[in-house]
Image: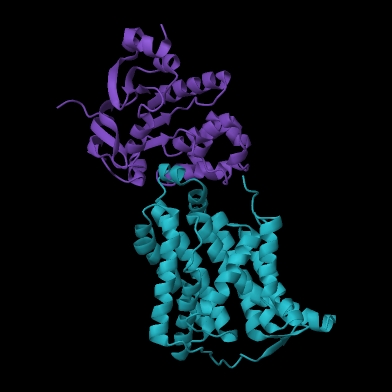
Chain colours: A purple, B cyan
Amino acid sequence: MSVVRLLDVRGLRAGYDGVPVLHGVDLQVDAGEIVTLLGSNGAGKSTLNNNLSGLFQPSAGQVLFEGEDITGAPSMGIVARGLVQVPEGRRIFPNLTVLENLELGSYRRARGHCSRNLECVTAIFPRLGERLPQAAGTLSGGEQQMLAIGRGLMAEPRLLILDEPSLGLSPLLVEEMFALIRRLHEEGLALLLVEQNVVQSLELAQRGYVLENGRIVLSGTAASLREDPALRRAYLGV
Amino acid sequence: MLDPIILLPAAINGLTMGAVYALVALGLTLIYGVLHIINFAHGSLLMVGLYGAFFLHRAGLDPYLALVVMVPALFFTGYALQWSVIGKASHGSDQNILLVTLGASIVIENLALYFFSADTRTIDTPYSFEMIDLGVALVPLPRVIAFAAALVLAAVLWFLIARTDLGRAIRAVAKERQGARLVGIDVDHIFAMSFGIGTACLGAAACLLLPMFYVSPHVGHVFVLVAFTVVVLGGMGSFSGALIGGLLIGVTESLGGLLLGESLGQMGIFLIFIATLMFRPSGLFGSRLS
C-alpha cells in the first residue's frame, strides 16, 4: 500500500446531459504540494473542478480525498471535508457585504474559528479589511478575486482549488496573485492551480498535468514539463 | 366628498388593509427573490391559512392566538411543498416551477371546494365591531391589530433576513447559487426555507385577516393579484418595496372605493400597476434592470 494521497482522482468520466467531456482523468495531489492543471479553453478543466467539488455527478471513476471516497458526494459534504474551490469567475455574493461574504466562507467548516480566520484573511488582504462594510459587487475585479480566495481560506481548506485566479487581471495583479499563491503554499497549504498561464504556473508548481479534450495528455514534474517539446510547441509557441 | 373628515378615515382604513397586503406581498417577494419565480400557489395557501384559522376558531381558539399554530403550520406546509413537490418536479428549470405552483394552486382550491363547499364564511368575535378612536377617525379594532401586528412581523422578517446566518445564506442563494454551493450551503434546504418563510407570512396574514374578512375557496384570488401588483410596484424581490407598496396599494384601494364606488375600488390598483410597468418597470425600490 502506498502512502495515502490528499487527492486521488482515478479514471474520472463526466459530462453534461450525456455529452461526455472528461474521458477518464487520473490526477493526484499530495499534502503541501502545488499541482498545476494546464489546458486550453474547453479542455475540461472547469468540468473537472466542478465534479471534484460535487456540483456535478461524475458518470464513472473515483475521487478519493484523504483516502475516503467522495465520488458523487454533495458539495456541502465535500466542503466540510476541507476540499474548497475558488471558482472561475469568482462567484462572490455581489449583494452581500465583504464581511458577509467572508463569514459565509466558514458557513460549513471552521465556523468556530470564524473571527480568528477573519483576522488572518484581512492580514493577508488588507484591502478587504478596509472594505468590510462595502457591497462585494462594488469591488474592482482584482479585489473580487482576493475576496473569492479569502472566502475560500475562511473554511481552513486542506486542499484549495484555484480555477484561473489570474483571469481578467492586469499583468501587475497577476504577479501579485502568483506571489500570494506562493505565500499560501509556504504556509503549508496544498493547492491545485488550474491555469492557462503556463509559464508562471510551472515556475510555481512542483508537478503539473496537461488536459486536452478531456484527457490527461502529459504529466510530470514542473521542470520536466517546462522542457517538454510538445508542451513548448503547443503553449509557448517555440 | 373630498372633505378630510371622510378622506382621512378612508386612508387610515386603507393603511390597515395595506399592512396585510404588505405581509402577503413580503412572502411573495421573498419566494420570488430566492427562487426567481412568481408563486402562483400563494393565494391558495393564504386560503388554506384562512380555513385553518377558521376551524381553529370553531374549536374555540381566538384567531390571534391561532397565530402560534398557523405560522409554524404554514411554514412546514411551504417547506414540505417546495422540498417534496416543487423542487423535485422542477428539474432545475424555473419555468417548470411556475407551472408546478400553478398546478398546485388548482389542486388546493378544488380540494377546498370539495371539502368545504363554495360557501363564504365569516367568524364572530366579541371584538369584531369594537371601534378604536384614533382622534381623526374611528377604526375597527381588528384593523388596528392587523396593522400593528403586520408591521411587527415585517420587522421580525427583516431582522431574520438581514441579521442572521440563515438570512445571509438566503441572500447568498438568491444572487449566486453556484457560489453558495461552493461554500457548502445546502441550496435545496435554503430554497425550502425561503418557501416556508414566505408561506409562514400567509399563516400570519390569515390570522390577522379572519376577524375582519371572510373565507371561501377562492378568497386567495383577491389577494394574489393585489400582492403581485405590490411586488411589481415595490420592485421585484425588494423588501422595503413590498412593505411600502402594500401600504400604498391599500390606501389607493380605499380611496378609489370612496371616489368610484366600492366595486371599482380595485381599479385604482391596476391603474397604478400599468403606470408602474410603463414608467418605472423596475419598481419604486427595484434596482434598475441591467
- Location of the N terminus of chain B (image quadrant): bottom right
| Residue depicted at x 46% and y 69% | B41
Which x, y percent locates residue A132?
Answer: 60, 40
Residue A237 coordinates in the image, percent (x, y): 42, 9
Residue B281: quadrant of the picture:
bottom right
- The reply to whether residue B247 is in sight is no
- The residue positioned 34% from the left and 63% from the top of the image is B84
Residue A210 locus on image (x, y percent)? 33, 20
The number of discs equals 0
Report the front residue among B63 and A3: B63
Residue at horizontal 48 percent and vertical 56 percent from the top: B35
| In-front residue for pair B128/B13 | B13
Residue closest to the far right: B3
A116, A78: nearer the viewer: A78
In x, y percent, where is residue B79?
41, 64
* Left or right of B35, for residue B149: right
- Residue B157 seen in the current view: yes
Residue B12 picture quarter: bottom right
Is B46 placed above or below A191 here? below
Determine whether, in the image, residue A17 is placed left or right of residue B57.
left
Q: Is residue B185 above or below residue A177?
A: below
**Where the C terminus of chain B falls, by quadrant?**
top right
Q: Quadrant of residue B272?
A: bottom right
**Compared to A120, does B177 lie above or below?**
below
